Amino acid sequence: MKRKIRFSFMNRCFSKKYGQGETREEIENTYIRSKAEVGRLTLGGGNTADFERVLGRIVLNAPDRRLNYPGYCAACGCDRNFILTDMFAMDEQLCFRESMICPVCGLNNRQRFMAGEIFKRVNPDKDHVYVYEQTTPFYRVLKARLKYLTGSEYLGDFAPGTVREDGIRHEDAMNLSFPNESFDYAISNDVLEHVADIRRALKEMYRVLKAGGIMMATFPFIWDLDNTVRRAKISDGNIEYLLEPIYHGNPLGGGSLVFYDYGWDFMEFVKSAGFSDAYFVPFYSVMNGHLGRNTLYYFVAVK
Ligand SMILES: [Zn+2]
């Protein structure tokens, strides 16, 4: 309780001293289409960096290594106390992107923002939305609001479109079962780094979107990398490791192999799949609990 009070006070002081005008504590309507525009991703001044460092020090010195961070949850539609922990912390630097979890809806920092953006863009009674997950808090948040939502997981050796007894649908991002032009939106959260062939996955996404349909995605992206690095590939049905294998957590358990570290040629992959416009949308907000300088963004492509 003590920590919470101290932090609320600090949050207020920060807003006052470094509020809008002096340091941009929010990013809005900034679209990044090329490497040359990446500078715009960095927030003005060093104040947000200081703020994140101070928060890191508090969390890492707290007995339970966590902190309640007040803010507005766009997924819940009200104020919550997000839980900032030391998960994935490295060299005294917190991993804000995966943390700051809402205790009620269960979404983390980037997922809360994505949910908010989806609710801003999507017509909940009319638009058909496909999301590349079905067993997650994120799916449940969307399901509660959107009338025409389809979710799926990669379950392994099933025919695409198979629905298991527990209602979980199997889809392979590289071979979707949906007819052409089925969806207004296709949404993927940290999935695309795990597909074995990104060009095929993007072509499939393009195929199932209606004309004017929109892809919204998050995935790890390396801002100063020109050419995507392929970490693994499938040859003759077997996984061939080109680099030391890296695995990310999977909602169904186990780990998902990372096939790609994406760089700027990702734009070319997207365009050659047929998409017309493509851009990154960075975000940052002290007041809404979206911290993590230069790590917060999502990707949009328009059919
Ligand atoms: Zn929430």
Image (cartoon, grey):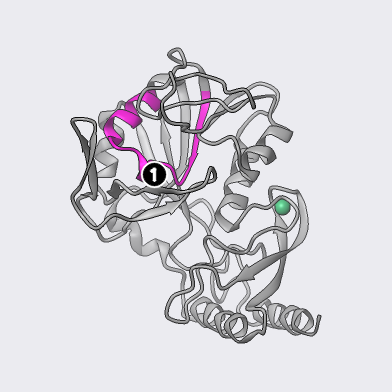
Judging depth in this view, the residue of 97 and 168 nearest the camera is 168
Which residue is at a point 25% across and 30% down the rendered structure image? 272
Residue occupied by mark 1: 279
| Residue sitting at the far top | 179
Judging depth in this view, the residue of 221 and 125 nearest the camera is 221
- One can see residue 255 in this view: yes
Label 1: few (<14), some (14–19) or many (≥20) C-alpha neighbours in 10 Å: some
Q: Is residue 176 left or right of residue 16?
A: left
Q: Is residue 139 left or right of residue 131?
A: right
Name above or below for residue 97 compared with residue 149: below
Residue 240 image position (x, y, % from top left): 20, 43
Q: Is residue 179 left or right of residue 106?
A: left
Question: Of the residues shown, which amino acid type is indicated by label 1?
Answer: Tyr
Name above or below for residue 177 compared with residue 120: above
Judging depth in this view, the residue of 142 and 66 nearest the camera is 66
The answer to which quarter of the image holds residue 36 is bottom left
- Which quarter of the rendering shows the N terminus? bottom right
Name above or below for residue 210 compared with residue 28: above
- Which quarter of the rendering shows the C terminus? top left
Q: Is label 1 in a helix, a strand or a loop?
A: strand
The answer to which quarter of the image holds residue 194 is top left
Residue 43 image position (x, y, % from top left): 46, 69
Q: Is residue 218 magenta?
A: no
- One can see residue 275 in this view: no
Ligand 1 is within 8 Å of the C-beta of the residue at disc 1? no
Residue 210 image position (x, y, % from top left): 47, 19
Which residue is at a point 43% across and 18% down the rendered structure image? 159
Q: Is residue 205 magenta?
A: yes
Which residue is at a point 60% across and 87% down the rendered structure image? 61
Q: Is residue 162 left or right of residue 206?
A: right
The residue segment tinted magenta is 184-206
